[in-house]
Image: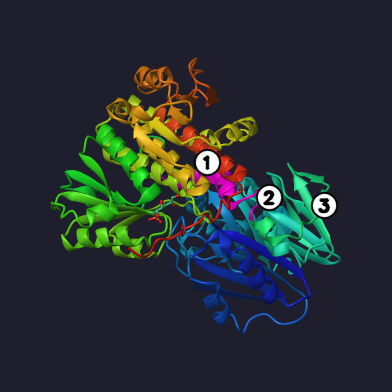
Amino acid sequence: MCGIVGYIGSRNIKEFLIEGLKELEYRGYDSAGIAILQDGALHICKAVGKLENLINKCASIGHEGFGVGIGHTRWATHGKPTELNAHPHLGEFSYVVHNGIIENFKTLKEELDPDRFVSQTDTEVIVHLFERELRNHSDPFKAFEATIARLRGSFAILLITKAAPDTIFFARESSPLIVGTKGEEIFFASSDAPLIGHAQQVHYLADGEYGFARPGEVVLFHDGRRIEASYQPLTIDKELAQKGGYRFFMEKEIYEQSEVIGETLMGRVKEDRIEFEELDRTFFEGIDSITLCACGTSFHAGLTGSYLIERLAKIPARAEIASEFRYKEPLLRPNTLFVAISQSGETADTLEALKMAKRANLKTLAICNVDNSSIVRLADRTLLTRAGIEKGVASTKAFTTQVALLWMLALYLAQRELPPSTLERELQSLLHLPTALRVPPQLHERIRRLSKRYLHGHGFFFIGRDIFYPLALEGALKLKEISYLHAEGYPAGEMKHGPIALADPELFTIALMPKGLLYDKIKSNVEELSARDATICAISPTPFELADDYIPIEEQEHPMLEYFQMALVLQLLAMEIAIRLGNDVDMPRNLAKSVTVE
Ligand code: F6R
């Protein structure tokens, strides 16, 4: 996910910008750049890959003395990770960095001279729009104000221009931005970490705030009216700052899901269809079955995807565990599409399974979170999940973005055949995901309190039916990997075929009971367990009288929205139990984030 820094003052400006970007590295990026305005001259430097590349390239720019500068790390979403697409973006005499998405950039671009555009990004429109506005308004701030008034979407923007060589113009809408001061010096960043040790006080911009900063002065506006900044001292703990105030990266990543799912959907869910700029219809010609292959949590996403693809697109789909697939001597038929699903893009078993599919001349598609990873480089096509870097070993936001993408893929394959009203319902439900994935404080608190009752016993069953079966597997995996308690996921209908023999009060059953899918069936499965004295914790929009504990989710129009809300509950439950047991939630024992060996 992208990061922003900015500086006005007389310290070594290049050093500050690069050090600031280093502090944002943990967010993940695939290109970076800085721009400096000193003595009336603009200098820019951009590079693909690690910051080292940028440092090597920009050795000759910037010098001691007063200047203004902006910097950016980019995680590609619109347009490939190339130097041209890296920020800052330039006009004739101005530079801009931007986080977020300008939703109406195509319309705006049509108004401007298309020959000026050199990148595939939405961001570039900002700088050209600003320079055009500057022809109508002699005051650069008025031109900036007119520019941001035209933008729709989410943004954190810093802009520098020769027309105001001691100034940074800034704006925030739904994307974090902080301004800090120390005497005459002014600092900007998209999160605390780059400012720690530099700024004395900071103001966290609220949505709709914008303004300009000059040495010793930050002028802030909202809705055309001047407002006062509310400065506060800055925390001094860097790791705490990177965790955004959360106790663990896992917790931060659970809370981030609402935002990153928005990124996953961005530009792909249109009014009447799904569109992937990375794919065209011809890629799917001749495909009559789909194999989804992955490990661990990614396999659970794949299993969910197999239900969705068969149900919506009517294409036979099956999910395979990569480590099994490699050695089962699978029949690889040429009309099968092979989909490799991986957060890291480096998992050895998934990579090897993909190589097998390639050798058998299957068409291959990667669903992955890391661009340029081995799996992405090998697959014919890639859909990036856009979850941003995931630091917690227990996967959370990578999982939900994978499932969202698979849901979109199922609809993409189905949309020509689906009745318009069904398609509309699906698309509307997809668009509701960012809302469904917000964590209500009372829900988290309820789970936290409940968690104290689940620290013992001889094990957990997570049960669900249909798509809630893969989710039950994921809930059990989440719990076992960070709490070290024994947990199994089961299809609820299977309990009476053996596992129910274990039922007693010390066996905790986490029952996924969606209102919108097979409610009566799962209810009778849970009744059977309750009759044998198992302790039941029901997760459902409807209270269930036989449950010992009940975690409510909201009533939803679509079972997939129930699915995502339950995913949130299962992640929080696992985390709260693990915290109570005193475990290191982010780095559980025996586990690695990326499993690059067989
Ligand atoms: C569990 C978890 C693992 C990974 C698995 C595959 O929380 O993170 O089960 O899902 O190791 O990793 P990727 O998705 O990187 O291929």
Q: Determine the secondary structure under disc 1.
A: helix
Label annotation for residue 231:
3
| Quadrant of the image containing the N terminus | bottom right
Q: Amino acid at mark 1?
A: Ala
Label 2, on which residue? 245
Residue 401 placement, left or right of 374? right
Residue at (53% x, 59% y) in the render: 124
Q: Residue at x 77, y 76 (%)?
A: 11
Q: Which residues are magenta?
A: 243-270
Q: Which callout, 2 or 3, points to the residue nearer the camera?
A: 2
Q: Is residue 94 visible?
A: no
Disc number for residue 55: none
Residue drawn at point x = 15 percent, y = 53 percent: 332
Q: If you read the primary sequence from the N terminus, does the residue marked by circle 1 or circle 2 appear first?
A: 2
Q: Amino acid at mark 2?
A: Gly
Residue 410 sits in quarter: top left
Mark 2 → mark 3, Cα distance in angstroms: 18 Å
